[in-house]
């Protein structure tokens, strides 16, 4: 038995002293307990999520029976809340892949404890996101016409349209993410199978682990497959949101037609994604007593990444404004001014600056990065800020484009908000089911990390880092 | 397949069974023949689909029986309308001549607008009228139509039109009405109230009625009647005359608040004639000049070269000042402060330079004195007989309708009237409030109301008779110049309506007379020679040849100096005018007209107190605030809309709204301005206004109109003067203010056949909205309602963008019809993921509704924002269709919810021409394809045709130096281009007046 719990914080990727059994106990015990012994906070969270999911379904029923007119969209603002929320959710989905694939390839061992739930978060966020473009169609029941399938009409989708690129980008991202997540789960599922306490668990995890034996050959192939998938999904970090950015960048709309969009969207997505990771990790480590595995080191690193990507995003804002000025085009200049000073929506821009630029500045301080409460608060603010950013880009841009005669306004309706609130229910329901039914930390990798730590110490920079921390603490 | 309960069938039983059948029997196995339960259950389990027929009790005979019954019963649904047509329903055994299924027929007819004819060609699809076009042979329309005429097709199918004769709300028959009106005595206590009568048949009938009942009183009341014009002519010439201005002969026009292109008799003809003198294509083209003084922005003012916003007294003051300077003995009126010497000098200079080719016109609702003074000025300028001709009156009895109504009400209140027959109109709603027509009606024993709707008057009257729509009845009506049209019906009356002719015939004791016979009788009297030949020709052409009112020559204007001109002195006046869409309120239940954005304000579904920015500041109100208006002792609260170009101190409120009994569409829309209308101040009244609490949301379709700042820098509306054009005849800078590249990576597509294109001449567009309703009618464009317009989801395929140049207090106006530009490199096309919007081989940007999934990306990427989206189920679909879906054009798809739509260049009309040309093995001729908007346009501002045909009008116009594409720097290569707006300011004022670029 290793250290079981406790709120002792550590700067290492895993608190020293964990042995494999301790890791299994900490992570798997809450999964394997009987229904009756499920924690109360889980029931509360799950109940709220289910209620919101009900709202989501009700909104969808109204949407399908009445039409997209229940939303606040209009001409000229033909895209609004559904697309804003789509981009917002898909952005959140980014951290998962970055953590699991990119950091794996860059041999960042600290990723290990947070990759599992970050991947889960990715998949659920993609589910929430992916439904939006379908629901916001005028005729959602024929969404499959975007797919290149053989049909008697002899019709094919138009591959010149960024919306079709979108479909494939999201489809690829969703399928690779699910695959990557599932492959990573296999050894852990086998552990759960081995530790199951009921017949139902045995059957469930037995099926899911695909007959994992733990043989050396299996491990070798597993790791090869995992690495290959990581290599496959790494470009997706860049491609998905770049493609979504092209929905805007490819258009002629002033304020959209801008080459900075793809990189700036990717940075924004990672930014928002890490905010969401922190928003989930901080309560999760508390609830499951995982402070020893999701350590200060993780929070600190996530905060640093948030700060870095946040500053890239802010740079993007200034590039946009500069571009508008430098283009010399009246349409672009007016659009920039309208976003910043326009009578109807200036507040959205300044609020987003407050959220995405001002609110992240405390992250330069280590004391803030190591304060879970502060991090949680900043993450919430960043999530709001990133929503506002999409609101500014999608809706406000469309209110005033080329011909003043066609300018309009935009006010979201009840159903806009209900579908948005409901999508949290969808996300929450899936996420609560996930943490209840599957190990939210990759135990097999954690064991490897613990083993590695025990035999080789931590990573080569650990001592240097400790020195720096000590000096900081003194000054 | 057997168990104990179902023993295996014996061969014996099978043999017996087979022997028992007749004819050849086929069987698949022994079990089937045995028809055992076991076999049935086996079949049900293993082959459920094949088992079904076995289980079904529906055998072939039963099926056929049912089929027959359903067919028979299906006929029952045709019985929904109890008033089944008179005799028999027979399919075409022999198809009528010319009737080709799928191909419409056109019939000449006319609509009476304020008593004056607008000649129409009604389009009929297998007997169902769906659209009207202007009759090119008719002097008042010359092929054009007004927005209202287009929309009346919808009223024809309005299910809320009154559908039965009623007495106090209870259904009655025509015979019963005849019985009730059988004893009129000598007519002493009988009054007939008509609207403006120009119809020769109506006039004859009334005359005959008066012969039969010598005491019968005939009164006329139309709230929009030009009483001032009638009385003014009488004052000036000493007799009743119809005065016809000839804009085609005038080089200089001074309009004293005359909205001659949009208001009053002959407006379409005037617009056409006036625009023909402003058609500038190059620096060599001459252009007339319009001086305009107006109290409120009107469509004519949009064309003005010099515009002066004056309150009504100021307009009279200007008339007096002009008269004085021209040496006319004129009554005195204070000179308006806004009138500067330079302006007046230049105007007088211009008028005097063009003696005999200038023209002064006074507004439709100007007082008699201004009209008389106008005649005197024209006389002094030598314009009488040149640009102004005088004719025998067109109206059967020209008179002041207000006086006529006042007399009638006095008689009613005095108990002198026992029977009042109202043939059309809605006086309970439209009569001046102080006359209290409703109360006067109560003093009459029997009131009979004939109307399209059981409206306010119909509710109040003892008897109500449904009136025929103008496409349902025979009639005749005269145009502004007196030319008569014999109007023929397109369809049998839907709801058993009766025409005024039939009602008057009933009064005369002939309840069985048909309108057809009555009209024929009138003309039989007038025509010598072969009547049938005349009749056929006249009905066919839609205009009776040589029926124009004879001209009266040799008259000169008597001394008008004794007249009283309005003296002003009020700092706030109320101006009451009929609504540009709803008229006096009669079209309130027409959704197309309710949702038609009004010129300038672009308001829909409401009227508002329109006032200038300065007046608003003075009253401390903003848009959508409420204003408590007190005039002539009555008070009304109306929402405020700040309208640049309004004269300071004038509050314009449109009549026609606030109806109580208009129907579901029109009831309760807007405020009833008639409540402020007094018989002694029917048009202009001193006003007290105070800000009231609360706000009213107003649905305007265009919120940003100022050209100043970013609007000007976008170079959307390009405008200059004749002088600018002459200075740079080959490449005017104002037409091409920005250089742009037209480089493209891809090679241009070659259009070998036709290449359709359009040119819009901004100089002559008046913003009259005829194109908007014409498009709505042609292309089945749905209406969406006020709440949806407020959100910004109106569906019009063509809109008329209004822009203001200059200052808020003294703006100049630009109208820009904007529909799909059919870009050759259309930004909407590459972004559609399903390829629902594409280019065709002739350069049309087409929408495939069936393929559209509704991503709306095309709309985002359209720089012109001309695509409209069915956010909800706006169109009436056949599954729950009402009568109104019958107004739909069968050549155009009715779009369902979730689908994008937009202008198609009337692709159905192109197809029709293409098929026709193909059948005749020739190319499509120029002018063969006319889009709906182009056909309706009174000023020919829209030209459409084949760009590959060098000689086509559109190709010639595209070669004009004024031709430009909106947002050309985007390289969308629009097929619709615009001719830059050109004004012709007086050289002396060119530096400052309206139009100086």
Image (tube, coloured by chain):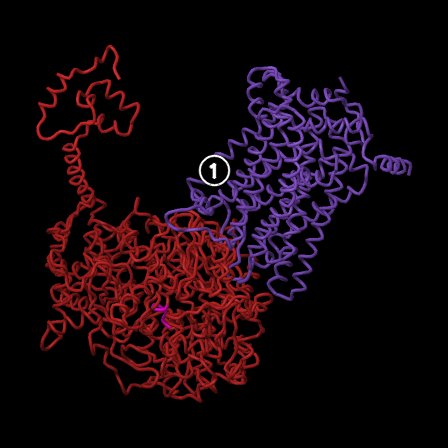
Chain colours: A purple, B red
Nearest the eye: B804 or A378: A378
The image shows residue B286, relative to residue B774, as above or below, that is below
Of residues A397 and B627, the one drawn nearer to the viewer in this rendering: A397
In which quarter of the view is residue B22 placed? top left
Q: Position of residue A376 (x, y in %)?
A: 71, 35
Rendered view: B992 above or below A393: below
The segment highlighted magenta reads B934-939
Quarter the N terminus of chain B occupies: top left
Check the picture and name the quadrant holding the C terminus of chain B: bottom right
- Reading the image, the residue beneath label 1 is A60
Q: Eyeballing the image, is A115 above or below B812?
A: above
> Magenta includes A99?
no
On what subunit does the disc labeled 1 rest?
A
In which image quadrant can residue A280 be found? Answer: top right
Query: Looking at the picture, how far across and down is residue B679, in whole percent?
Result: 35, 62
Establish if B41 lies above or below A298.
above
Q: Is residue A202 visible?
A: yes
Residue B740, percent from left and from top: 57, 72
Residues B359 and B964: in front is B964
């Amino acid at each position: 038995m290793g250290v079981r719990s406790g709120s002792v914080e550590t700067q290492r990727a895993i608190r020293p002293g964990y042995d494999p059994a301790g890791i299994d106990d900490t992570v798997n015990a809450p999964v394997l307990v009987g229904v009756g012994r499920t924690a109360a906070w889980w029931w509360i969270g799950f109940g709220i999520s289910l209620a919101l999911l009900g709202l989501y379904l009700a909104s969808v029923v109204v949407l399908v029976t009445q039409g997209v007119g229940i939303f606040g969209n209009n001409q000229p603002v033909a895209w609004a809340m559904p697309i804003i929320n789509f981009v917002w959710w898909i952005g959140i989905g980014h951290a998962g892949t970055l953590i699991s694939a990119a950091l794996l390839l860059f041999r960042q061992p600290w990723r290990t404890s947070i990759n599992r739930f970050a991947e889960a978060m990715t998949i659920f966020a993609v589910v929430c996101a992916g439904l939006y473009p379908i629901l916001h169609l005028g005729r959602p029941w024929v969404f499959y016409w975007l797919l290149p399938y053989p049909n008697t009409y002899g019709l094919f989708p138009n591959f010149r349209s960024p919306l079709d690129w979108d479909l494939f980008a999201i489809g690829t991202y969703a399928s690779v993410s699910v695959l990557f997540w599932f492959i990573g789960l296999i050894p852990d599922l086998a552990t759960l199978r081995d530790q199951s306490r009921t017949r139902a668990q045995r059957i469930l995890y037995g099926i899911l682990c695909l007959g994992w034996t733990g043989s050396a050959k299996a491990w070798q192939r597993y790791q090869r497959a995992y690495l290959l998938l990581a290599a496959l999904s790494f470009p997706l970090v860049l491609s998905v949101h770049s493609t979504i950015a092209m929905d805007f960048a490819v258009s002629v709309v002033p304020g959209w037609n801008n080459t900075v969009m793809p990189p700036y969207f990717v940075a924004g997505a990672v930014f928002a994604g890490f905010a969401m990771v922190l928003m989930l990790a901080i309560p999760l480590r508390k609830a499951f007593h995982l402070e020893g595995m999701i350590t200060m080191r993780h929070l600190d690193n996530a905060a640093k990444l948030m700060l870095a990507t946040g500053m890239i995003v802010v740079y993007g804002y200034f590039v946009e404004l500069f571009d508008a000025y430098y283009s010399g085009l009246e349409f672009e200049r007016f659009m920039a001014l309208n976003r910043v000073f326009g009578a109807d929506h200036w507040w959205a821009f300044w609020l987003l600056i407050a959220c995405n630029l001002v609110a992240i500045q405390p992250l330069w301080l280590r004391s803030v990065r190591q304060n879970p409460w502060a991090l949680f608060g900043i993450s919430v603010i960043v999530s709001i800020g990133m929503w506002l950013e999409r609101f500014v880009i999608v809706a406000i841009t469309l209110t005033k484009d080329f011909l003043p005669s066609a300018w309009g306004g935009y006010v979201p309706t009840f159903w806009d908000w209900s579908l948005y609130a409901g999508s949290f229910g969808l996300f929450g329901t899936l996420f609560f089911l996930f943490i209840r039914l599957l190990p939210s930390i990759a135990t097999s990798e954690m064991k490897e990390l613990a083993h590695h730590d025990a035999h080789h110490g931590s990573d080569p920079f650990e001592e240097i880092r400790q020195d720096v921390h000590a000096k900081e603490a003194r000054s | 397949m057997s168990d104990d309960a179902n023993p295996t069938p014996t061969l014996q039983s099978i043999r017996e069974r087979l022997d028992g059948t007749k004819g050849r029997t086929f069987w698949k196995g022994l079990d089937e023949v045995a028809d055992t339960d076991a076999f049935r259950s086996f079949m049900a389990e293993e082959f459920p689909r094949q088992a079904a027929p076995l289980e079904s009790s529906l055998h072939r005979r039963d099926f056929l029986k049912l089929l027959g019954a359903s067919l028979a019963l299906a006929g029952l649904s045709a019985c929904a309308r109890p008033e089944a047509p008179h005799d028999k329903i027979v399919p075409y055994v022999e198809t009528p001549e010319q009737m080709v299924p799928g191909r419409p027929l056109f019939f000449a007819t006319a609509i009476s607008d304020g008593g004056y004819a607008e000649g129409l060609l009604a389009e009929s699809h297998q007997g169902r009228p769906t659209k009207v076009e202007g009759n090119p042979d008719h002097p008042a329309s010359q092929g054009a139509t007004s927005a209202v005429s287009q929309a009346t097709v919808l009223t024809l199918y309005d299910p809320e039109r009154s559908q039965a004769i009623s007495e106090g709300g209870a259904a009655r028959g025509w015979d019963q009405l005849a019985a009730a009106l059988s004893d009129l005595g000598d007519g002493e206590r009988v009054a007939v109230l008509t609207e403006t009568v120009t119809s020769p048949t109506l006039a004859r009938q009334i005359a005959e009625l008066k012969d039969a009942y010598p005491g019968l009183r005939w009164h006329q009341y139309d709230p929009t009647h030009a009483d001032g014009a009638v009385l003014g002519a009488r004052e000036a010439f000493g007799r009743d005359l119809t005065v016809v201005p000839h804009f085609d002969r005038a080089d200089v026009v001074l309009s004293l608040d005359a909205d001659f292109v949009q208001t009053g008799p002959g407006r379409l003809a005037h617009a056409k004639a006036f625009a023909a003198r402003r058609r500038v294509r190059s620096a060599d083209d001459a252009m007339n000049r319009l001086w305009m003084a107006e109290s409120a922005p009107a469509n004519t003012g949009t064309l003005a070269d010099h515009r002066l916003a004056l309150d009504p007294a100021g307009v009279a003051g200007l008339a007096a000042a002009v008269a004085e300077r021209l040496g006319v003995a004129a009554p005195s009126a204070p000179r308006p402060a806004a009138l500067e010497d330079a302006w007046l000098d230049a105007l007088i200079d211009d008028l005097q330079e063009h003696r005999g080719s200038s023209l002064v016109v006074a507004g439709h609702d100007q007082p008699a004195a201004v009209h008389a003074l106008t005649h005197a000025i024209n006389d002094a300028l030598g314009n009488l007989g040149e640009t102004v001709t005088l004719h025998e009156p067109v109206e059967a009895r020209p008179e002041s309708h207000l006086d006529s109504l006042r007399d009638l009400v006095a008689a009613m209140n005095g108990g002198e009237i026992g029977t009042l027959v109202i043939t059309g109109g809605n006086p309970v709603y439209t009569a001046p409030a102080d006359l209290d027509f409703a109360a006067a009606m109560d003093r009459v024993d029997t009131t009979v109301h004939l109307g399209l709707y059981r409206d306010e008057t119909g509710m109040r009257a003892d008897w109500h008779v449904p009136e025929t729509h103008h496409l349902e009845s025979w009639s005749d009506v005269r145009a502004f110049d007196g030319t008569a049209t014999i109007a023929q019906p397109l369809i049998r009356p839907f709801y058993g309506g009766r025409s005024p002719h039939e009602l008057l015939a009933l009064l005369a004791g002939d309840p069985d007379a048909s309108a057809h016979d009555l009209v024929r009788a009138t003309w039989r009297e007038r025509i010598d020679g072969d009547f049938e030949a005349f009749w056929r020709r006249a009905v066919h052409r839609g205009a009776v040849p040589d029926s124009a009112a004879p001209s009266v020559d040799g008259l000169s204007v008597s001394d008008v100096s004794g007249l009283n001109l309005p003296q002003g002195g009020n700092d706030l006046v109320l101006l009451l005018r009929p609504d540009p869409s709803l008229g006096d309120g009669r079209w309130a239940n027409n959704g197309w007209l309710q949702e038609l954005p009004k010129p300038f304000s672009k308001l829909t579904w409401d009227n508002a107190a329109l006032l200038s920015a300065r007046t608003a500041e003075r009253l401390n109100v903003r848009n959508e605030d409420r204003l408590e208006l007190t005039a002539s002792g009555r008070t009304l609260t109306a929402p405020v809309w700040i309208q640049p170009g309004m004269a300071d101190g004038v509050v314009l409120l449109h009549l026609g709204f606030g109806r109580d009994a208009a129907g579901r569409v029109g009831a309760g829309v807007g405020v009833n301005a008639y409540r402020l209308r007094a018989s002694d101040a029917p048009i202009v009244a001193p006003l007290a206004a105070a800000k009231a609490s609360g706000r009213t949301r107003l649905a305007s379709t265009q919120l940003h109109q100022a050209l100043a700042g970013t609007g000007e820098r976008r170079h959307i509306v390009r405008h200059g003067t004749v002088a600018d054009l002459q200075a740079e005849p080959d490449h005017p800078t104002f037409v091409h203010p920005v250089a742009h590249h037209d480089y493209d990576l891809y090679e241009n597509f070659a259009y070998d056949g036709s290449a359709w294109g359009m040119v819009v001449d901004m100089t002559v567009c008046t913003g009259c909205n005829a194109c908007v309703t014409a498009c709505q009618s042609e292309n089945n464009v749905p209406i969406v309602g006020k709440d949806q317009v407020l959100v910004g989801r109106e569906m019009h395929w063509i809109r008329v963008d209004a822009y203001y140049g200059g200052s808020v207090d003294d703006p100049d106006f630009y109208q820009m019809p904007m529909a799909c530009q059919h870009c050759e490199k259309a930004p909407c096309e590459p972004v559609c993921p399903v390829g629902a919007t594409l280019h065709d081989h002739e350069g049309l940007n087409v929408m495939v509704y069936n393929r559209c999934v509704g991503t709306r990306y095309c709309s985002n990427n359209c720089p012109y924002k001309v695509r409209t989206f069915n956010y909800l189920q706006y169109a009436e679909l056949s599954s729950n269709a009402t009568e109104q879906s019958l107004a739909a054009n069968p050549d155009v798809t009715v779009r369902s919810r979730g689908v994008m739509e937009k202008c198609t260049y009337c692709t159905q009309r192109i197809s029709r021409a293409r098929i026709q040309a193909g059948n005749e093995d020739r190319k499509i001729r120029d002018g063969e394809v006319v889009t709906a908007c182009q056909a309706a346009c009174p000023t020919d501002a829209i030209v459409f045709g084949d760009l590959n045909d060098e000689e086509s009008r559109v190709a010639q116009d595209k070669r004009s130096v004024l031709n430009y594409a909106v947002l050309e720097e985007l390289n969308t290569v629009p097929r619709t281009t615009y001719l830059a707006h050109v004004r012709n300011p007086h050289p002396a004022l060119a530096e400052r007046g309206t139009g100086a670029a």
